[in-house]
Image (spheres, rainbow, N blue to C red):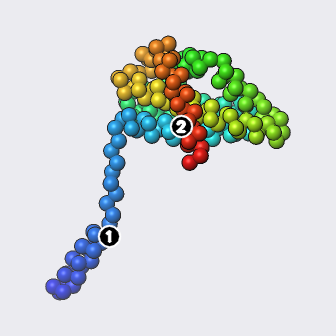
């Protein structure tokens, strides 16, 4: 190989290196990762609320929340147990009172009415599902960030904060739906 050919190959290699776009690796803190996961699953839950089959929508929202907290547990290196999660999740839901629970069940059940049932349900259930998912994700993220686990999570201590996060979550879900 002549010197000219070597120089051309070196130039080609330099051009190739310049053309390679080095993708920046985004390094997120654990709380930022948890927030990103929460916001992703707010959308999944809102979408689950649009499933036209009564009570399958609620199951989809629950599955999204289980998956969300499972992923979050991995971010924090915390063992996940669906059984333990259920045991702390239900009391959290209970802190919201009967109105959100009844609204969710009614919004799901009304889907049996052809046409109008899905329309009416699609106006309330996706926002409710997104808000609950936002509150759940946010409360677990702050608990995990403070060094907590599923084993030491105390729903009773978190109920007032959970209510605030639920109210905040309604706006987050509405904003996410309009984006």
Visible residue check, residue 14: yes
Q: Secondary structure at mark 1?
A: helix
Q: Residue at x 41, y 26 (%)?
A: 142
Q: How many marks?
A: 2
Q: Tell me where residue 41 appears, x and y as whole percent.
A: 53, 38
Give 164 or 20, whichever is nearer the viewer. Answer: 164
Q: Residue at x 50, y 17 (%)?
A: 160
Question: Are there few (<14), some (14-19), or many (20+) residues within 10 Å of tag 1?
Answer: few
Question: Disc 1 or 2, which lies upstream in sequence?
Answer: 1
Instruction: Please indicate whether residue 164 sits to the left or right of residue 107 in the image.
Output: left
Q: Which mark is residue 45?
A: none
Q: Foreground mark, 1 or 2?
A: 2
Q: Measured from the top left, where is residue 143 in percent x and y?
A: 41, 23
Q: CA distance from mark 1 to mark 2?
A: 40 Å
Please tell me the numbered disc located at residue 19: 1
Residue 21: give x, y in percent of width and height: 33, 64
Give the labeled residue for mark 2: 172
Q: Residue at x 73, y 30 (%)?
A: 107
């Amino acid at each position: 190989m002549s010197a000219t050919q070597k120089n051309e190959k070196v130039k080609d290699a330099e051009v190739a290196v310049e053309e390679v776009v080095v993708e920046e690796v985004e390094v997120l803190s654990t709380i930022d990762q948890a927030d990103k996961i929460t916001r992703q699953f707010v959308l999944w839950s809102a979408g689950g609320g649009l499933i036209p089959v009564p009570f399958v929508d609620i199951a989809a929202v629950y599955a999204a929340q289980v998956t969300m907290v499972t992923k979050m547990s991995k971010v924090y290196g915390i063992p996940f147990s669906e059984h333990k999660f259920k045991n702390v999740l239900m009391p959290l839901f209970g802190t919201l009172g009967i109105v959100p629970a009844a609204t969710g069940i009614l919004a799901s059940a009304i889907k049996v009415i052809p046409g109008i049932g899905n329309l009416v349900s699609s106006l309330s259930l996706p926002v409710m599902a997104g808000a609950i998912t936002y509150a759940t994700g946010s409360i677990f993220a702050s608990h995990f960030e403070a060094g907590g686990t599923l084993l030491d999570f105390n729903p009773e201590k978190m109920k007032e904060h959970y209510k605030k996060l639920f109210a905040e979550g309604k706006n987050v879900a509405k904003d996410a739906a309009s984006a």
